[in-house]
Amino acid sequence: RRVRGSFYHWNFVLDSFIDIDFNMNIPFMITATASLAEELDKKLLVVLRDGRKLVGTLRCFDQFANVVLENTVERIFVQNEYCELDIGTVIVRGENVTLMGEIDTEKEVEIVSENKWVSVDQLKLVQAHLKEKKKIEEQQKVKRKLLFNRGIIDDLDDLHI
């Protein structure tokens, strides 16, 4: 029997199962946490609010999208080099998750093979070098602005230091 006059229309089936009549344009919504059930026991990439990237197997979650990842590694990329820090089992608070998705193993192999694996110490040296280089570039930019404001150079791109 059909119930009319309400926003939702249900089609009741006699064999005690409730079936939604999808031809009647019933709004259907699954919450984000309910859709995580499909990802259980799969290898996921989780990007956190602070930019860290965790790769691990989803073991459980709750209504707040807090997740437990097992065999987790933090994957750090700097230019075309990367390293992995073994973290183990980790609980990630749902509000810190920016992005979460299943890893395609074929594409993961491609990405990993395109980049060079280095040790954590080597990667920290590369990060420090890049940070120092960026600091110098910022100082040069400020210097060019000062020279431009004082009329010493006509164009900000004139002075190449």
Image: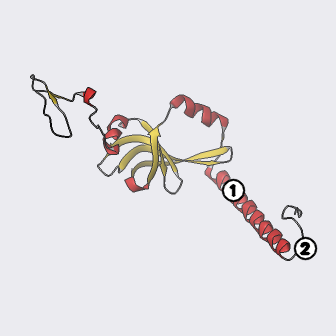
Q: Answer left or right for 62 relative to 114.
A: left
Question: Circle 1 sits on which residue?
Answer: 125
Residue 93 visible? The answer is no
Q: CA distance from mark 1 to mark 2?
A: 37 Å
| x 77%, y 65%: residue | 136
* Residue 133 percent across, percent down from the top left: 75, 60
Q: Secondary structure at mark 1?
A: helix
Q: Nearer the viewer, mark 1 or mark 2?
A: 2
Q: Is 44 drawn above or below residue 87 in the view shown?
A: above
| Mark 1 in CB contact with mark 2 (< 8 angstroms) | no
* Residue 64 percent across, percent down from the top left: 32, 52
Q: Is 154 drawn above or below residue 122 in the view shown?
A: below
Describe the colour scheme in one phrase.
secondary structure
| x 10%, y 22%: residue | 15
Question: Circle 2 sits on which residue?
Answer: 152
* Residue 68 percent across, percent down from the top left: 36, 47
Q: Answer left or right for 66 relative to 127.
A: left
Q: Locate residue 33: give its quadrant.
A: top left
| x 83%, y 69%: residue | 144
Q: Secondary structure at mark 2?
A: loop
Q: Answer left or right for 105 relative to 80.
A: left
Q: Quadrant of the N terminus?
A: top left
Q: Residue 63 versus residue 77: which sits nearer the camera?
A: 63
Q: Residues within 10 Å of mark 1 (few under 14, many from 20)?
A: few
Q: Answer left or right for 130 relative to 43.
A: right
The type of residue carrying mark 2 is Ile
Residue 48 visible? The answer is yes
Q: Residue 4 versus residue 120: which sits nearer the camera?
A: 4
| First-in-chain label (1 vs 2) | 1
The type of residue carrying mark 1 is Leu
* Residue 73 percent across, percent down from the top left: 50, 46
